């Protein structure tokens, strides 16, 4: 099934190029997943009000940042692999997958929102729940993806708490490669995009042309405040971007549409070299800013 057919099934008007689903999944798997997702969003969409709009903005914005963060990690992993920076690879591969798992879960209609508790689920809960929810795409996807998520976690932890003398060779053929991690991250990103596209189309069906607002609720701080041991930190870029969406965001929108040019440029430019280095070999964080999410 090509991307145009997938877009049509979601009911969204946003033209999106799906990267992984068309090659990994059968037509019936995609059709069944979208049909079930639309059904699950139906009662949410029927009762949709400003409070729901606020919740789903928070979930969507966090999901987008997780995917963009995973893109930085994926680009870093490719760069590190090209330059034999092997010691960084277990970390980069694992957190790329973990963050895309978070994005997938945050956009699911069947995962209740519990504010900070939802954001700060344990790693084991995130990975196990991701595997469980992939059953809706097909049992074989849980059977193939979940073990690789857990393997990536084990491989990261081994080089966080122990340090085998054989380096990455200790994993043999079971190692989660950079390419494999990117493929799984793309699958989870595609599903997050589908989830929000289905929500968008369901809300438009029951409330055509209605403009929803964003409420001033404590949970909104989860999009811009970062609690660390010493003191909470407020990200100025997040603060300004959320203020922009408070003015412009009138209803649910898919990840691709939420990723505006300005947001994407600012996100990736933050990872530019701290000094003005003219070095062709320097890492360029936005060399493939659409590696996971079809931004343009």
Image (spheres, rainbow, N blue to C red):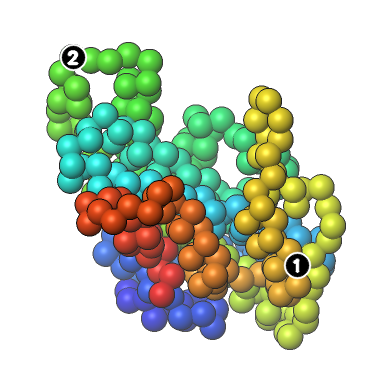
x and y percent of residue 82 in the render?
17, 46
- Point out which mark residue 246 bears: 1
Residue at x 66%, y 53% (from the top left corner): 236
In the rendering, at what x and y percent does residue 184 appear? Answer: 34, 50
- Residue at 44%, 51% in the rendered image: 271
Quarter of the figure that contains the C terminus: bottom left
For the residue labelled by badge 2, is the local secondary structure a helix, a strand or a loop? loop
- Look at mark 2 in the image and give the residue it sits on: 165
Characterize the local packing of mark 1: few (<14), some (14-19) or many (20 or more) Cα atoms within 10 angstroms.
some
Placement of 250 over or under 264, stated as above or below: below
Left/right placement of residue 240 relative to residue 97 reads right
Can you say which quadrant of the picture contains the N terminus? Answer: bottom left
**Please, which residue is most extreme toward the bottom here?**
209
**Residue at image coords 20%, 27%:** 168
The residue at the point 43 percent across, 70 percent down is: 295
Tell which circle, 1 or 2, labels the residue nearer the N-terminal end. 2
Q: Crowdedness of circle 2 by 10 Å Cα count: few (<14), some, many (20+)?
A: few
Residue 177 locus on image (x, y percent): 23, 41
Q: How many marks?
A: 2
Decide which of 168, 236 is in the foreground and name it. 236
Front residue of 192/258: it is: 258
State which quadrant residue 211 falls in.
bottom right
Residue 117 position (above or below residue 162): below
Is any atom of residue 235 visible in this view? yes
Judge whether residue 139 can be spotted in this image.
no
């Amino acid at each position: 099934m090509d991307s145009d057919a997938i877009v049509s099934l979601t009911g969204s008007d946003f033209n999106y190029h799906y990267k992984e689903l068309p090659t990994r999944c059968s037509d019936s798997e995609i059709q069944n997943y979208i049909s079930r997702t639309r059904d699950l969003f139906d009662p949410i969409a029927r009762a949709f009000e400003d409070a729901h709009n606020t919740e789903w903005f928070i979930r969507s914005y966090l999901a987008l940042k997780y995917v963009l963060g995973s893109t930085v990690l994926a680009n870093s992993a490719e760069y590190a692999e090209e330059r034999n920076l092997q010691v960084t690879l277990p970390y980069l591969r694992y957190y790329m997958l973990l963050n895309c798992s978070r994005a997938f879960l945050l956009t699911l209609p069947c995962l209740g929102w519990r504010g900070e508790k939802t954001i700060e689920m344990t790693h084991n809960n995130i990975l196990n729940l991701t595997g469980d929810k992939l059953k809706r795409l097909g049992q074989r996807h849980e059977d193939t993806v979940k073990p690789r998520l857990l393997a990536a976690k084990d491989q990261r932890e081994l080089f966080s708490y122990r340090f085998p003398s054989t380096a990455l060779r200790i994993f043999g053929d079971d190692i989660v490669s950079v390419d494999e991690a990117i493929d799984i991250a793309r699958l989870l990103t595609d599903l997050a995009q589908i989830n929000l596209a289905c929500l968008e189309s369901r809300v438009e069906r029951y409330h055509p042309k209605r403009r929803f607002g964003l409420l001033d609720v404590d949970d909104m701080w989860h999009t811009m405040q970062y609690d660390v041991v010493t003191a909470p930190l407020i990200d100025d870029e997040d603060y300004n971007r959320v203020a922009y969406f408070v003015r412009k965001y009138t209803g649910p929108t898919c990840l691709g549409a939420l990723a505006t040019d300005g947001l994407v440029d600012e996100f990736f430019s933050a990872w530019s070299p701290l000094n003005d280095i003219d070095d062709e070999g320097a890492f360029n964080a936005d060399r493939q800013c659409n590696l996971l999410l079809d931004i343009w």
